[in-house]
Amino acid sequence: MVSLLDIIGPVMVGPSSSHTAGACRLGLLARALAGGTPQSGLLQLHGSFARTGEGHGTDKALVAGLLGFRPDDERIREALQIAEREGLSYRFEKTTIADAAHPNTVRISVELDGNSATMLGSSLGAGRILVQEIDGYPVEVTGNFHTIVLVAEDRKGSIARITGILAEHDINIATLKLTRKEKGGDAFMVIECDESPDRAAGRELKALDWVRWTRRLDKVSGG
């Protein structure tokens, strides 16, 4: 099914929906993983992002996302200069990422106040994105929903407890995916929600003694 967005593209600062709008949204998600504008970021560009990204403004769009700018923000054009003023230290590398799902792919590593996160994602065209990996765990995050990601001990009843907290805060779950590296080890959970989780729900999740790490990723795409 082809949507109107696929035909005319998203509202954005140009020139390319793949290289700018999608890249900006990937930067926004990486920023959310850091918990705010990161102090430092390493952006490893693969495929078309590496070959033609600079000419299409991919570098500016990615950094703009890290700064919290959305795809239609006119400040994207000056994002690199703004980052210097805001104290965001960034570095780009051109690389080849094995098994990358798409030529417009970037691995973003961010750090803020000693907390670090790494995200692998692709821009699919018309502003659509897909995050395939967070901190080494395979995921599928589109940015079309408000999303909670968390790492917890792999123990019985954990899913029921987490979903119960969200239900108590009137948050409806659209999708829930869980992966783990081994039985009894850490489990990585991605929960896409129809409503934006409030701070109180986040505090309750973080207070669970078997939850190691949790982040909220705001909706960054249309739909």
Image (cartoon, rainbow, N blue to C red):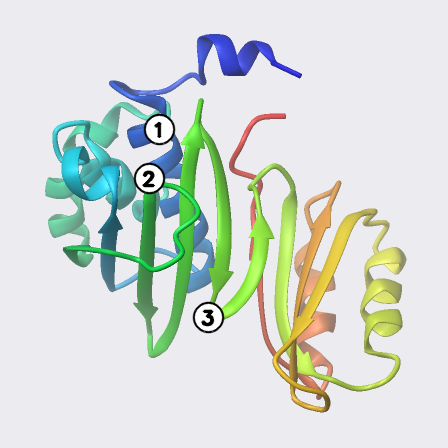
Three-letter code, disc 2: Asn
Label 1: element kind: helix
The span from disc 2 to disc 3 (Cα, nearest Å) is 20 Å
Tag 3 secondary structure: loop
Q: Earlier in the sequence, mark 1 or mark 3?
A: 1
Residue 104 % position (x, y): 33, 39
Q: Residue at x 14, y 42 (%)?
A: 80
Mark 3 belongs to which amino acid? Asp
Residue furthest to the bottom in view is 184
Residue sitting at x 72%, y 88%: 183
Labelled disc at residue 55:
none
Say left or right for 87 vs 112.
left
Which residue bears the numbered disc 2?
A: 104
Quarter of the picture containing the C terminus is top right
- Which quadrant of the figure contains the N terminus? top right
Q: Which residue is mark 3?
A: 135
Q: Callout 3 environment at 10 Å: few (<14), some (14 to 19), or many (20+)? A: few
* Residue 174, x across and y down, in percent: 78, 45
In this rendering, is residue 2 above or below 136? above
Going by the picture, which residue comes out furthest to the front? 99
Nearer the camera: disc 2 or disc 3: 2
Place of residue 101 in the rendered image (x, y in percent of width and height, measured from the top left): 44, 47
Q: CA distance from mark 1 to mark 2?
A: 7 Å
Between disc 1 and disc 2, the foreground one is 2
Q: Earlier in the sequence, mark 2 or mark 3?
A: 2
- The residue indicated by pointer 1 is 18
